Image: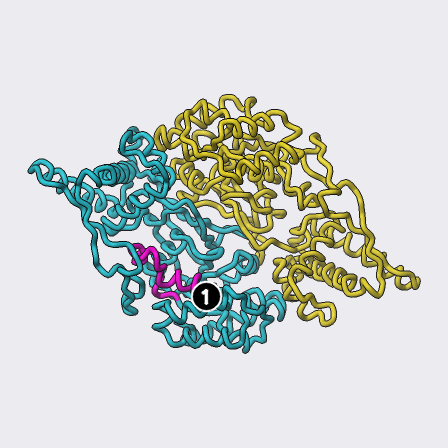
Chain colours: A cyan, B yellow
């Protein structure tokens, strides 16, 4: 690894340099306390739903500010040591432009002797603490999720670089034919060039493939992103950075059911409840809901399925407990409409009117009135 | 749709023309019988494990040849009509170079009046019958799976075309930086250019990302394919066509556990038991097992996890019932070794020796002795 350090450092991003400065500062702080024969301490935000706040103008669930302190004592010495070693691993990763999954970090710890983790959930918790401690996302610390997801096609050039040569790579997403550009696990280093009018984010791989197959993005002048279900961190972060940097709107096209609305769309837009320390980075506040809306089911005479028990429970929970749904009367009304009629409709139900009705009729009609999109 | 017919036809593949001929022939056969006032019939292969045979030289589970006949009677009239309409839909798809997911086909049937399907499982069954009837894979009939999966990076150019202009698109998988080429749902029309020495097929997205991040494919002169768990049909078919056409070996790198061996690797190599009428197209008989082997766990002193009950059951079932495992004594021995030691190891466990030990040491050592790879 050391031999690659020079090239990696040259390629290091400004974000990387900032993380390194923060790591140095916290290390010096702890070192100073120890040299002064004081007990070193670290303060972490409390990561729990009880410490979460929703401000619509901010657009995502955020930490309410409570912190817990971890002081070095006989009882905490192992966790304290593990936290420091995890921070040291992060420093090494950032310096070497390298990455480690949660699982890899766990295995690396097997060489930390007394500080080794016995089970991966322990190392995951320490990693979450470190992430919250520095208030940056895990990817900036060099830690990456296991899962990958998100495909892109259409009017976008992704700018990346070759790690060995440093050469710029311009990846043209109009040139993938029936295939697509697969979003990498970390996206912080990517830049974008586009003249697209909007980003269309799609729930199912099948619908994405239809729009790609028919070059839908050409006529509509847009970028297509496939989430393949609940979007991964990388996929959410990719859409967010793209939409922020290029200042283009994000329209979301998912199934017309409680899952599509309160799990997939809500997670994409404002983040999730149990990872509020991350939502700032992994939400897309500018996202708006194109369809399938509860009203679309009626207007487009879509074939429906009855709501399952789990759908009913999900819709009722959202109306009662989800700060995002509760804040937007339109969504409360939409959920109630689904519950009253007792039905749901999938985005592919549009095929009833012909396989390409979605391309020829539904999407153009909806896009004529973006002001009507649900919040 | 009709307006696009001309271009689509021009782009139509030889495989498409063959399917159309087969559809015409079967339709004429039925038409002739009706005009002769005889009861039309159709013969389908029996799709069940009792009608499966494993010949190692053929390399995959195949249908043993038993067929069931569906004659037009009062009882079968609806299914018979649905089968004909499904075939007609396939004809329309192939003629228009279009696609439909199973779900879309179900929704299209909502306009078939009395022949409409009430539940998707009914239409899925008829589609499976049609697929087996013509002995081609569903993709060639224009029917595509819902799910998508499989990323590619490294020394490969995928040749596709732009649907509207017919222009050839050469997709260079060395030029995606930290990203990758995402395999489309249908791959029959793709061509390949490569001078790679082998294809390395990887179980986890995390390991794939590591190898991509470090441009592993450059030094090793290979193509990297990420399966992301059990490979989808598209991913298996892609590897198969690539390996067949370019005549390059396929090495598989998965977790060293019963799931990685008997589910992921076995499915990739010989197919699955409950879809034997498809295995001919969706298996990769030339695949060989690089690791993690049960012996690697010992040789590389890997950190392990204890086998779970489900692992033990899976290993025992494989030894007793899986024709592939049973045929290869090395695999029976390997499974027994896992059971005796009661442990499993993940591919990311190599990180114990350093994050890039897999790149610097493990893979080069293994690739020096490809003749030792398990069958």
Is residue A95 in view from this perspective?
A: no
What x and y, as percent, mark residue B289? 55, 30
Q: Quadrant of residue B212?
A: top left
| Residue drawn at (39%, 46%) of the image | A185
Q: Residue B182 in the image: x percent, y percent?
A: 50, 48
Q: Where residue B37 appears, x then y in whole percent?
A: 92, 64
Judging from the image, mark 1 belongs to the subunit labelled A
Q: Is residue A279 magenta?
A: yes
Direction from residue B6 to residue A73 in the image, left or right: left
Q: Is residue A167 above or below residue A276?
A: above
Identify which residue is drawn at 64% across, 37% down: B270
Can residue A284 be seen in this snapshot? yes
Q: Quadrant of the N terminus of chain A?
A: top left
The picture places residue A166, in percent across and down from the top left corner, at: 33, 39
Q: Disc 1 marks which residue? A: A314
The range drawn in magenta is A259-287
């Amino acid at each position: 690894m050391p031999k690659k350090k020079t090239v990696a450092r040259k390629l290091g991003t400004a974000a990387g340099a900032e993380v390194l400065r923060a790591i140095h500062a916290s290390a010096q702080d702890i070192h100073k306390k120890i040299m002064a024969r004081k007990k070193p301490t670290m303060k972490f935000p409390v990561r729990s739903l009880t410490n979460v706040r929703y401000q619509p103008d901010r657009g995502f669930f955020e930490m309410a500010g409570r912190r817990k302190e971890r002081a070095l004592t006989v009882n905490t010495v192992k966790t304290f040591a593990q936290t420091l070693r995890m921070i040291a691993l992060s420093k090494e990763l950032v310096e070497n432009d390298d990455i480690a999954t949660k699982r890899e970090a766990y295995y690396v710890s097997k060489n930390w002797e007394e500080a080794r983790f016995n089970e991966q959930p322990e190392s995951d918790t320490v990693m979450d603490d470190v992430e919250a401690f520095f208030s940056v996302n895990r990817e900036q610390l060099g830690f990456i999720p296991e899962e990958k997801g998100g495909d892109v096609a259409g009017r976008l050039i992704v700018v990346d670089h070759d790690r060995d040569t440093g050469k710029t790579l311009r990846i043209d997403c109009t040139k993938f034919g029936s295939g697509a550009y697969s979003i990498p696990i970390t996206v912080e280093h990517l830049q974008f060039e586009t003249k697209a009018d909007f980003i269309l984010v799609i729930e199912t791989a099948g619908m994405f493939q239809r729009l790609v197959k028919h070059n839908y993005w050409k006529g509509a002048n847009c970028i297509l992103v496939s989430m393949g279900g609940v979007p991964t961190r990388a996929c959410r972060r990719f859409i967010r950075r793209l939409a922020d940097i290029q200042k283009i709107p994000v329209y979301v096209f998912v199934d017309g059911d409680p899952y599509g609305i309160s799990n997939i769309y809500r997670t994409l837009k404002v983040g999730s409840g149990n990872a509020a320390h991350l939502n700032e980075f992994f939400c897309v506040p500018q996202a708006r809901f194109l369809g399938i809306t509860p009203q679309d089911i009626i207007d487009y005479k879509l074939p429906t399925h009855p709501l399952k028990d789990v759908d009913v429970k999900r819709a009722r929970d959202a109306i009662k407990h989800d700060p995002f749904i509760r804040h937007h009367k339109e969504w409360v009304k939409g959920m109630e409409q689904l519950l009253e009629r007792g039905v749901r409709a999938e985005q592919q139900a549009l095929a009833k009117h012909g396989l390409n009705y979605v391309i020829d009729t539904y999407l153009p009609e909806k896009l004529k009135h973006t002001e009507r999109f649900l919040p």
